Amino acid sequence: MRSTFGRTDWLSGTKVETPSTRARRDRQFMPALPERIFVKLVKLPRRAWAVYVVALLRSRLERTKIVTLTNCFLQRFGLSRHDKTRALPCLEGAGLLRVERYTKRNPVVEILT
């Protein structure tokens, strides 16, 4: 049984972080941010900055400005769907993202800056 933390030990039932997962998590995470974007993010409420950084990371991984922001990807970083729901209007209002929302589907986000 796979989890976001590695694997579950079959004998004890506890989650064990495998060496490959540990190596992936030890790499540099924070994508470089221009100062003007950082200044905008600091002024936003709650976890909007974290949602933006995760969207930016996803954008750089996929090498495209338009990405689908999934709950599963956000959960890897300790963010909930509620954090995403609250953060997207703030980020859109600040002019950092453009969001296309769909019923019962994940939003499609375009990184503007």
Image (cartoon, rainbow, N blue to C red):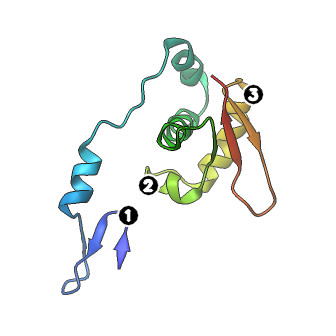
Q: Nearer the viewer, mark 1 or mark 3?
A: 1
Q: Which residue is mark 2?
A: 76
Q: Which residue is mark 3?
A: 93
Q: Residue at x 49, y 36 (%)?
A: 60
Label 1 packing within 10 angstroms: few (<14), some (14-19), many (20+): few
Q: Position of residue 56 (x, y in %)?
A: 53, 35
Q: Position of residue 94 (x, y in %)?
A: 70, 24
Give how far apart the Cα atoms at labels 2 and 1 are: 7 Å
Q: Amino acid at mark 2?
A: Arg
Q: Residue at x 67, y 43 (%)?
A: 86
Give how far apart the Cα atoms at labels 1 and 3 are: 32 Å
- Using the image, determine if residue 112 lies above or below residue 35: below
Q: Earlier in the sequence, mark 1 or mark 3?
A: 1
Count of numbered circles in the view: 3
Q: Residue furthest right?
A: 103
Q: Quadrant of residue 98?
A: top right
Helix, strand or loop status at disc 2: loop
Label 2 packing within 10 angstroms: few (<14), some (14-19), many (20+): few
Helix, strand or loop status at disc 3: helix
Give how far apart the Cα atoms at labels 3 and 2 are: 26 Å
Q: Which residue is mark 1?
A: 4
Q: Position of residue 20 (x, y in %)?
A: 22, 58
Q: Are marks 2 and 1 in contact (CB under 8 Å)?
A: yes
Q: Which mark is residue 83?
A: none
Q: Quadrant of residue 59?
A: top right
